[in-house]
Image (cartoon, helix red, strand yellow):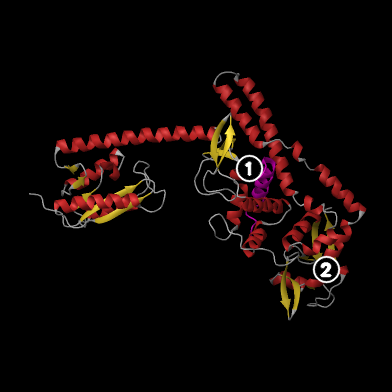
Amino acid sequence: MRKRPTHPAIYARLSQDRNGDSLGIDRQRDLMEAVADVRGWPVPKLYGERNISAYSGKKRPSFDRLIADIKAGVVDGVLVVDEDRLSRRLGELNAFYELCADPYVPIVTLSGEVDTTTADGVMRAHITGAVAQNASAKESERLKRQRAQAAKLGLYQGGVRRYGYTATRTTTIEIDGKSYPAPAIVEPEARIVRDIAERLLRGESARSIVLDLNDRKVPTAKGGEWTVGGLLQTITSPHVAAIRTHHGEEVAPGAWEPILDRATHEKLAAIVNARKGTRGRPAKSLLGGIARCGRCREKLHQTRQRSQRIYRCQSSGERRNMCKGVIVDADALDEFLSAVIVKRFNSAAFRKALARRVKSMTSDEDIEDPGALEAELATLAAERGEGRISPAEWRIMRDAVQGRLDVARSALQRAADDSTVALLSTPDLATAWPSMSIERQRTILGAVVGKLAIGPTRVPGSNVFDPKRIDVEWLV
């Protein structure tokens, strides 16, 4: 005679807990506690699992813990609403039955007890498991087709709330005479997105924008503080430009209103890619790390000498013996170089050189859409696969489109590298310069100054400022 379990367990699983309240698991527990009571079993321990499919193959911590406790003899009876709650994968289900066969651990469902000790019982369990697995496979295929079709139509994919948009589909959009639900733009957040885009295109660093947003108590979509990674992910997301992706690939224009136009989105992506790996800490001085020692060529960094702010050579060892630790009055150098930049900006020669630089850049109208060119390549590949064009024709057309795509990407990269031109082209730099952030000022310096070296004084260790100590090489 089989013993009555003394330490039974309930396994309850919910594939999707949309409200986060686990009511589905609670209902499963209530049902199986009633079954345990009818059988005279003690109150079972709950092993609950939320938002995990039994078909996907993903790790299920509670299920794994249940198996471990059965092996350890901690659990000697299992209650579950239906067998497919345990698993919808036949191999995994069979392994569980084998585990519970010897020593025998009863598995009780709402339909009765699964007898894992007889051939008929195992056969019925296998049939039930196979039916569940087949049903899950068909459902998975149906969902994949449905999602692929929705992606091709450009329909909103749902998921977590994107910054700048409502969490739910609160509006509709017309496509080929049909109305489809779509999220609406949250205008205050959309203004933040456009402001971030404008500042990045002007050459401001992502870190300085993050500091500003957090100082102003502007929350993210989840209500927290901004990070550099979060900001860049938000601003370069295809979603803000209404671009529908599927498995990471662009498949169609999105069926919702864009916050940024396509050209702006492409420029921002190029800027972010160009700046990868260069985030670092925010700059605290105008020339720290830009100015160099005129003797050893090491960078000068901001520090203090008594109560005075200075730039000091960071060399050590033999190099320091060579340059004697060049230092210079930081306030005086900043003021002098700022005045020189403003003066040069107002000169006819500078304006002429800047005009040549702007003219040499590829204009927005000349930059082809990389996404459209990639789609053209995909179309050519499909036509080749269907036999509409010969291999030779396909290679010729493919190479031509690929060449245009390379040109477009290079143009966007140049636009990213020269993103300071819009800032430099302000009509009155003398007025704008004092109110600019250090990050913006440094961006302008990087665009116009190729070399800035500070020579030593006659007296080692002196920080006396003298314009003759300054050696500047101008790029524009």
- Which amino acid lies under the numbered mark 1 shown in the image of this protein? Pro
Q: Main secondary structure of the magenta part?
A: helix
Q: Position of residue 356 (x, y in %)?
A: 85, 45
Find the magenta span and give its range: 259-280
Q: In the picture shown, does residue 191 fall above or below 388?
A: below
Q: Residue at x 80, y 59 (%)?
A: 451
| In the foreground, 148 or 372 | 148
Judging by the rendered image, the residue that carries numbered circle 1 is 258
**Number of other residues with Cα within 10 Å of mark 2, as a class: few under 14, some 14 to 19, many 20 or more:** few
Residue 421 is inside the magenta segment: no
Question: Can residue 455 be seen from the camera position used here?
Answer: no
* Label 2: which secondary element: helix
Q: Earlier in the sequence, mark 2 or mark 1?
A: 1
Judging by the rendered image, the residue that carries numbered circle 2 is 335
Question: Residue 260, located in which quarter of the rendered image?
Answer: top right
Q: In the picture shown, does residue 388 fall above or below 118?
A: above
